[in-house]
Image (cartoon, coloured by chain):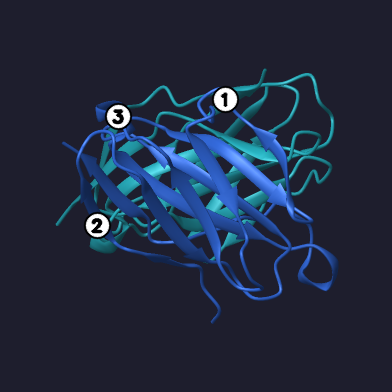
Chain colours: A blue, B cyan
Amino acid sequence: EPEVTQTPSHQVTQMGQEVILRCVPISNHLYFYWYRQILGQKVEFLVSFYNNEISEKSEIFDDQFSVERPDGSNFTLKIRSTKLEDSAMYFCASSGGGLAGGPETQYFGPGTRLLVL
Amino acid sequence: AQTVTQSQPEMSVQEAETVTLSCTYDTSESDYYLFWYKQPPSRQMILVIRQEAYKQQNATENRFSVNFQKAAKSFSLKISDSQLGDAAMYFCAYWNTNAGKSTFGDGTTLTVKP
């Protein structure tokens, strides 16, 4: 069964450093998302991406964040200058479109646990 | 903005018994979807069940079923014949069709006692 994959599974970085989190969505999906979950808290929407552009972003997704789909398979989240409060689990998700169904049913990757020291 | 409320931070159930997890939401939209996700200790988010708002029939997936009360904006999850592997955090989520994003509740931690 197709699944969303994410790398790395864990990342430790120093405050102020740049990190890139990588995701490979399900191959025939057209909608891509990043969510984050600070330990012990709810899952929060960061950004959605469709047709090679951001379609929606939250207040959390400020200028320190960017997303990119550099090729036909990867979807990345970059944090330019990490802060302590960026420590969280980051989930990538993808959903359908066209023959793969509507965008509403999101399939999540296993997450990347980011720790900023 | 939509909000999702899970009023039970923790629930426990005896193995083989039935448990119901509560979720309410607030929206002025008519077109939306509702979901339950399971998050085991590995923290992977696993889709359990989905409900289209325009459907009156409650969704079921094997031992998992929902009680969708649209007028009351309530969406509870019933787990029948609970198994040890059902122990996890369960999140209720609302899909905003216009905005194209999900809003999650705070989660309910389910413990299954052998």
Q: At x 27% / y 63%, what residue is drawn?
A: B85
Could you confirm whether marks 1 and 3 are on the same chain? no
Tag 2: residue type? His
Using the image as rendered, state which of residue B107 and residue A114 is in the foreground.
A114
Residue B29's place in the image compared with A117, above or below, is above
Return the residue at label 2: A10
Camera-side mark, 2 or 3: 3
Return the residue at label 3: A83
Q: Residues within 10 Å of mark 2 (few under 14, many from 20)?
A: few
Camera-side mark, 1 or 3: 3
Q: At x 23% / y 34%, what residue is drawn?
A: A15
Which secondary structure lies at badge 3?
loop
Verify CB contact (< 8 Å) between mark 1 and mark 3: no
Chain identifier of the residue bearing label 2 in the image: A
- Quadrant location, the C terminus of chain A: top left
Tag 3: residue type? Lys
Chain identifier of the residue bearing label 1 in the image: B
Q: At x 50% / y 26%, what residue is drawn?
A: A60
Tag 1: residue type? Thr
Tell me the CA gap for discs 1 and 3.
34 Å
Tell me the CA gap for discs 2 and 3.
16 Å
**Measured from the top left, where is residue A63 in percent x and y?**
54, 29
Which secondary structure lies at badge 2?
strand
Using the image as rendered, state which of residue A33 and residue B56 is in the foreground.
A33
Which secondary structure lies at badge 1?
strand
- Which dot marks residue B24? 1
Residue B78's place in the image compared with B32, above or below, is below
Task: Examine the rendering and report whether any part of residue B58 can be seen.
Answer: no
Using the image as rendered, state which of residue B24 and residue A71 is in the foreground.
A71
Q: Tell me the quarter of the picture where residue B31 sits.
A: top right
**Measured from the top left, where is residue A58 in percent x and y?**
59, 28
**Measured from the top left, where is residue A76 in percent x and y?**
51, 56
